[in-house]
Image: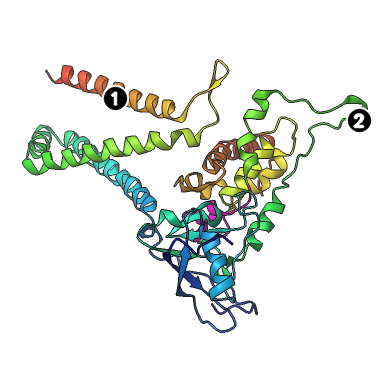
Amino acid sequence: MADTSDTGKRMRIEVLRYRPEQDAEPFLQGYDVPYSDDMSVLQGLQYIKDWLDGTLSFRWSCRMAICGSCGMMIDGEPRLACKTFLRDFPAGSVRVEALAHFPIERDLVIRMDDFLAKLESIKPYIIPKEARSLAQGEYLQTPAELDVYEQFSSCINCLLCYAACPQYGLNPDFVGPGIMALLHRYNADSRDGGASARMEVAGSEAGVFNCTAVGYCSEVCPKHVDPANAVNQNKTRAAGDYFLRLVTGKGGAK
Amino acid sequence: MNTPDPRRPYVRPMAGWWRRNPFFVEYMVHEATALFVAAYALVLLVGLLRLAQGEAAWNGWLDALRSPVALVFHVVLLAAFVYHCWTWFRIMPKTMPPLVIRGKRVAPGVITACGVAATVVCSLVVLVVAWGATR
């Protein structure tokens, strides 16, 4: 725990609470937390849990924007609690809520079953274009071939892009920005040959055309992935697949 | 929420979602400028209709366009068009595959600038041609 004994500064942290066994709906509960300039919002929540209210639930793990566990709405914006600092709220108060567009399991914990099911559906691994024996050696790749997918491989599944996507909020069937970024990460890899299998998802009713290019997903990504670009590049591919199917009589999308 | 799930996950309502974040408000505003584009298309279509109805109808349409209300309306339309165009090209780099020229990826800002420049050039060409045709 950060040493907060000498600063004398207090932050009012308003937390959206929801305890399913006793609350009909979520409500805001405020806590006064002593803080120092090096404390993150996550550390503020940890202070509450350790010293003020042990019943508060939230997810966290790495504290350094690697694990993607502590995504929350912080003053209405999807942010990682570990990468957002209390000193950046000079008004002396900050509102913390569970990630938007997901069902609340408890307090700041959202239910991510939907995301995990979608993640599995896109086969998020390399499906080799051609089988190679060990004797043939490794799959080689040029820097240019790496460049087309590298940024998409930075995704940490933190779901901030989903909380930034109103189309996902309005229609949770939409496969969504993060999954499309991961789908594109494998499709765009020169070693991969699974694009047509993944088109079943990208080109489906729940696929890319639910996106209306709001673009906020790419703004909020803490790892500088550009999910909006992944979705929109695949609009072109999905359209191509659709028309190709008219000619060849087969295609990926269901 | 009345779900049979004993964990009782709470689904928050989406009503009024676009007022929750300044980014969404701007999104709705720039999407709404498309209505101004549609409005101007209607103005032109009415002009075509009046042209088909004869010289008197056509001249009536031209007079209507010269009224102060029509002039103010067109200034508003122009402003909406400029904003529509800017937001359209602003999002364009996100909608296309990476553009690589001489081994280097073209920066998003350059793509947006090229789009805006193309719009300015096309608009000037149309303006000059229309000016010449009506002299």
Residue under the point 19% across and 36% down: B47
Identify residue for label 2: A134
The label number, if any, that marks residue A110 in the structure image: none
Query: What separation in Å lies between label 2 and label 1 (alpha carbons)?
Result: 57 Å
* Relative horizontal placement of residue B81, taking residue A246 as reference (left or right): left
Packing grade of label 1 (10 A; few <14, some 14-19, many >=20) is few
Residue under the point 59% across and 62% down: A1
Disc 2 + disc 1, Cβ < 8 Å:
no
Residue under the point 77% across and 25% down: A140
Pick whichever, B129 or A230, lies toward us: A230
Mark 2 chain: A
Residue A36 placed where, x, y %? 47, 58
Element type where label 1 sits in the image:
helix
Identify residue for label 1: B120
Magenta residues (range)? A156-174
Packing grade of label 2 (10 A; few <14, some 14-19, many >=20) is few
Pick whichever, B125 or A31, lies toward us: A31
Is A158 within the magenta? yes
Image quadrant where residue B57 sits: top left
Q: Nearer the viewer, mark 2 or mark 1?
A: 2
Image quadrant where residue B102 sits: top right
Q: Amino acid at mark 2?
A: Leu
Residue B127 placed where, x, y %? 21, 23
